[in-house]
Amino acid sequence: MLLASGGFAGERRGKDGALHKYDDVGCLLLALGAAHEETTQAWVEDHAGTGFVPLMEATLVRGSSKPTPMGYGIVAFRNPTEASRFVSENGGQIASLEELLRAGPRVLRSTQVPHAEEDHR
């Protein structure tokens, strides 16, 4: 997959060992829910620019005014302070991974920017 822009990507390693790449954290979360497999091998790109961070260690922000490549409106941060600063400047709220995964597609769709194109290639 060609990543549309930096600061929004995610990756996961499937049971088969293949690395799956996503250009939006929301796409990664949907794929994790659809895969129905337990994995600790998932990473998200730190929106502050410090590279990839394990998904389980990231602070996630949803519903900000900043658009994401696929319109899910979810960004990730390595540093919780950076996430709080981002919320202060762009709106949204800090959300736990568990909350986003449990709510599934319903919540992810509700964070999308209206009229965002969906293309999960």
Image (cartoon, rainbow, N blue to C red):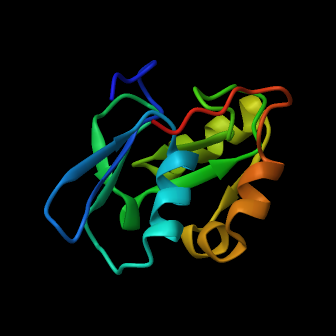
Going by the image, does 18 lie left or right of 75? left
The residue under the point 58% across, 26% down is: 69
x and y percentages locating residue 45 in the rendered image: 37, 39
Near-viewer residue (66 or 68): 68
**What count of labels does the image hold?**
0
- x, y percentage for residue 15? 21, 71
Compared with 29, 3 (above or below) is above
**Residue that appears at 45% across and 18% down:** 5
Please, is residue 73 above or below residue 31 in the view?
above
Judging depth in this view, the residue of 79 and 43 nearest the camera is 43
- Image quadrant where residue 64 sits: top right
> In the rendered image, which quarter is residue 9 located in?
top left
Place of residue 4 in the rendered image (x, y in percent of width and height, measured from the top left): 45, 19
Can you say whether 81 is above or below 55 in the image?
above
What residue lies at 56% left-to-right and 54% top-to-bottom?
60
Look at the image and tell me in which quarter the N terminus lies. top left
Quadrant in the picture for the C terminus: top left
Side of 62 relative to 53 (left or right): right
